[in-house]
Amino acid sequence: MFNTEMHKLGSNRSVIRELFEFGKQLAAKEGADKVYDFSLGNPSVPAPAEVKTSIIKQIELPNSTALHGYSSAQGDPDVRKAIADHIRTAFGVAADPNLIYLTVGAAAALCVSLRALKEEGDNFVCFAPFFPEYSVFTAATGATLRVVPMQQDCKMNLSAAEKIIDENTKGVIINSPNNPSGAVYSEEEIKKLCALLGAKSSQYGHPIFLISDEPYREIVYDGIFVPYLMNYYDDTIVCYSYSKSLSLPGERIGYIAVSPKATDAQNLYYAVCGAGRALGYVCAPHLFQRILIDCVDLPADVEAYDKNRKLLYSSLTEIGYDCIKPQGAFYLMVKSPEEDANAFSERAKQFGLLLVPGDTFGAPGFVRVSYCVSYDMIVRSLPSFRALFDTYKK
């Protein structure tokens, strides 16, 4: 009567979403001030004032039918040009507007890119820890996702990757700054990965694409450098979203950028357009396409996130938790005091703490703490973190 795989996905939400929904129920029962929800990566920093100004400007233009009408399937030409100009200025890459495809956020960018690349028998590879929806997006294409095991420092496990990438590997997905660890892959790691992919591509006689998932690109701390992948590897596809950098997760606007140096770049782009058409991802939200013309060069506001990061990391390590210090994004990985992170997450609920167990991220034994929350909530949560930790001392 219906697709059982789709039923399974719909009836069993992700662990993150389940915790988020549980938090809303708990808040209604116990009071919002007694719930410390660190589950969802929902930006707590307001969108820049320029976004509001641009929205007002757009909706007050006389030709409202154009604003609320369809754009070109791949996005308005002048919006794509604005994005290409930004990439050229910010990263020194000769980006081509005709190789950019506007999408409904980074999730759609990934789904379209994977569908555009996938052929019979293909697999894709990613590094743990990783965003768990990669498994869903890859499975929807009929491909297999092969996961490179996590290293304790969350750096790339390149020796394991060399064994996992094979003749059927069509692409490698990387996410830096990383969700859930906050790690930023160094230039040295990126160069080694690119050398590995180049060697494997030559060995197997076909390009292995690098798919760079970059929604957190601008959210970094302490002057950390984030390599722009097109400068290091020709066969790169960038999947980007303004959800985090401009605090617009609900507006669902992002893009795919195919490297102008990619193998058969124009035909690869046509495959992207075809995949967008097949999936129904044509004409990303037009109002927010237009706003990018005004806002594409705005920097991300990371001050509040950095303040939260410093408080949470220093406080939890002082209590006795073992944490991986994040270099970017707004997530902190905390080692569970017991082997089973799911049991630790369940125990944390007794103290009003909503912490995402790391198993689905490929990080067993850890929980993810999303600190894109109010500073006050972190302050109020610290006694609960201490009380939770004390239960293990007993």
Image: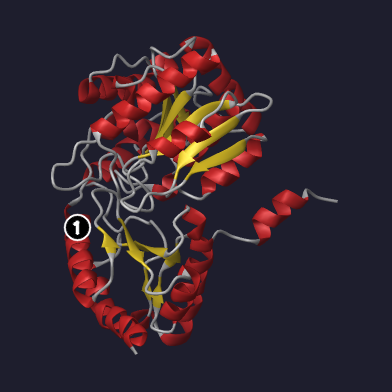
Q: Residue at x 49, y 9 (%)?
A: 264
The colour scheme of the drawn protein is secondary structure
Q: Quadrant of residue 281?
A: top right
Q: Which of the two residues, 245 or 7, is positioned nearer the viewer here?
A: 7
Q: Is residue 282 above or below residue 144?
A: above
Picture coordinates of residue 307 (x, y %)?
Answer: 16, 60
Q: Residue furthest right?
A: 1
Q: Position of residue 354 (x, y in %)?
A: 41, 72
Near mark 1 (Cα within 10 A), the count class, few <14, some 14-19 or many ≥20, is some
Residue at left offset 51%, top offset 56%? 360
Looking at the image, residue 36 sits to the left or right of residue 53; the answer is right
Of residues 89 and 64, the one drawn nearer to the viewer in this rendering = 89
Q: Position of residue 197 (x, y in %)?
A: 43, 23
The residue where tag 1 is placed is: 304
Label tally? 1
Q: Residue at x 60, y 26 (%)?
A: 168
Q: Residue furthest bottom?
A: 394
Q: Residue 267 is drawn in which quadrant?
A: top right
Residue 64, visible in the rendered structure? no
Q: Is residue 304 above or below residue 47?
A: below
From this view, report whether residue 95 is shown above or below residue 335. above
Amino acid carrying label 1: it is Ala
Quarter of the image containing the C terminus? bottom left
The secondary structure type at the circle numbered 1 is helix
Residue 357 visible (yes or no): yes
Q: Position of residue 372 (x, y in %)?
A: 30, 59
